[in-house]
Amino acid sequence: IDLQSDSDKISEIISTVIEPKTVSLNESLSKGIKIDLNDRIAFVKHLFGNSDEDYNRVLNQLITYDSFEEAQNFIEDMVKPDYNSWEGKEDYSQRFIEIIEKKFD
């Protein structure tokens, strides 16, 4: 029995398992939510109180969900209450939700 050889094999297996998978830019973008510039400007202004930071934070959270239901619950329970439930912004709200829903189709 060659213990050194076995130890090297185990180390190689462990480093392969632990090594993080690199994700190409295309892969990460394909999982994202595609929002054109005009919509982005409107959403930041009307839904997120002119805060690009808040808008980006919410979008980054939304792309982590596996289902539209999870994303919608997050918007209803965590996002909208911070912005007066988007009252009077129904057109923008509906458009935002529709774009988010497309990610999960």
Image (cartoon, rainbow, N blue to C red):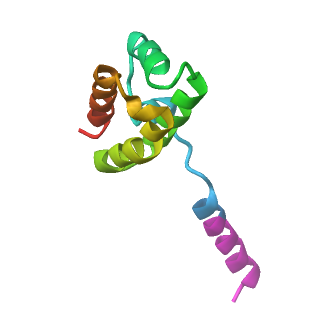
Q: Is residue 103 left or right of residue 79?
A: left
> Residue placed at 38% from the left, 15% from the top?
39
- Please identify the quadrant where the N terminus is shown: bottom right
Query: For the stretch drawn in magenta, what is the main secondary structure?
Result: helix
66 relative position to 78: left or right: left
Q: Quadrant of residue 102?
A: top left
x and y percent of residue 9 in the render? 65, 72
Pick the front one: 45 or 64: 45
Figure check: 59 above or below 39:
below
* Magenta run includes residue 10: yes
Q: Which quarter of the image is occupied by the C terminus?
A: top left
Q: Residue at x 28, y 20 (%)?
A: 91
**In which quarter of the view is residue 40 placed?**
top left
State the image coordinates of residue 16 (x, y, percent, origin top left): 60, 60
Asked whether residue 12 is drawn in magenta, I would say: yes
Q: Image quadrant of residue 71?
A: top left
Q: Residue at x 68, y 79 (%)?
A: 6
Q: Foreground residue, 66 or 93?
A: 93
Q: Position of residue 53 (x, y in %)?
A: 60, 27
Q: Residue furthest right?
A: 4
**What count of labels does the image hold?**
0
Decide which of 29, 47 is in the foreground and name it: 47
**In the image, farthest residue toward the bottom:** 1
The segment highlighted magenta reads 1-14
Quick check: 39 above or below 7? above
- Name the outermost residue toward the top: 38
Spot occupied by residue 46 in the image (x, y as percentages of width and height): 44, 19
Where is 74 relative to 43, above or below? below
Front residue of 79/20: it is: 79
Residue 79 as seen in the image, left or right of residue 91 = right
